[in-house]
Image (tube, rainbow, N blue to C red):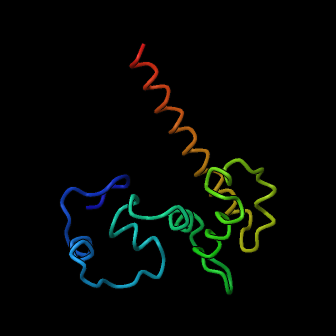
């Protein structure tokens, strides 16, 4: 089983084949890669594509994600934009925008929890 965060200590199946340099099936969506290898092995655009879930005619979820990261420079740049600005991106409707906003806010809260926990331990 691949953990949500980090990499699995014991590799099997596709994971072992990849590390051994053996070919594995191409993933049609980063969600398959996440399932096989774990979140730590995906880049920011692939993680964002999983949140976006589906694309639009002519634009895959991954293409939309890469466009967002290129447009805003990084996930941090994206997180610092107002929600209304995200609506101007082709293929990014209300549902996708709200998923992204919720995921980025959850990440922000998790980071703050980690910082506060470290501060408590050092006092």
User: Where does residue 34 sit, x and y in percent of width and height?
Assistant: 40, 66
Q: Residue furthest top?
A: 123
Q: Quadrant of residue 14?
A: bottom left
Q: Quarter of the image containing the N terminus?
A: bottom left
The C terminus: image quadrant: top left
Q: Is residue 35 left or right of residue 57?
A: left
Q: At which x and y percent is residue 58?
A: 67, 86
Residue 75 on image: x %, y % = 61, 55
Residue drawn at the location 43% of the way across and 25% of the way down: 118
Along the horizontal axis of the image, is 80 left or right of 115? right
Looking at the picture, tell me which residue is in the foreground, 115 or 21. 21
Q: In this image, 37 relative to 75: left or right?
A: left
Query: Is 33 or 69 nearer to us in this picture?
Result: 69
Numbered-mark total: 0
Residue at (76% x, 60% y) in the render: 86
Residue 28 rendering spot, x and y as whole percentages: 46, 82
Look at 70% across and 59% down and name the residue there: 72
Direction from residue 86 to residue 14 in the image, left or right: left
Q: Nearer the viewer, residue 84 or 69?
A: 69
- Residue at x 64%, y 63% (from the top left corner): 69
Q: Depth check: 95 or 16 in front?
A: 16
């Amino acid at each position: 089983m691949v953990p949500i965060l980090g990499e699995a200590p014991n590799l099997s199946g596709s994971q072992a084949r990849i590390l051994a340099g053996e070919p594995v099936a191409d993933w049609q969506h980063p969600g398959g890669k996440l399932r096989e290898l774990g979140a730590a092995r995906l880049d920011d655009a692939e993680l964002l594509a999983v949140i976006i879930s589906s694309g639009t005619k002519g634009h895959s979820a991954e293409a939309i994600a890469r466009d967002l990261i290129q447009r805003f420079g990084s996930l941090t740049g994206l997180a610092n934009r107002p929600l209304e600005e995200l609506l101007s991106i082709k293929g990014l409707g209300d549902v996708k925008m709200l998923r992204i906003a919720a995921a980025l806010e959850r990440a922000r809260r998790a980071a703050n929890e980690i910082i506060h926990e470290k501060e408590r331990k050092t006092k």
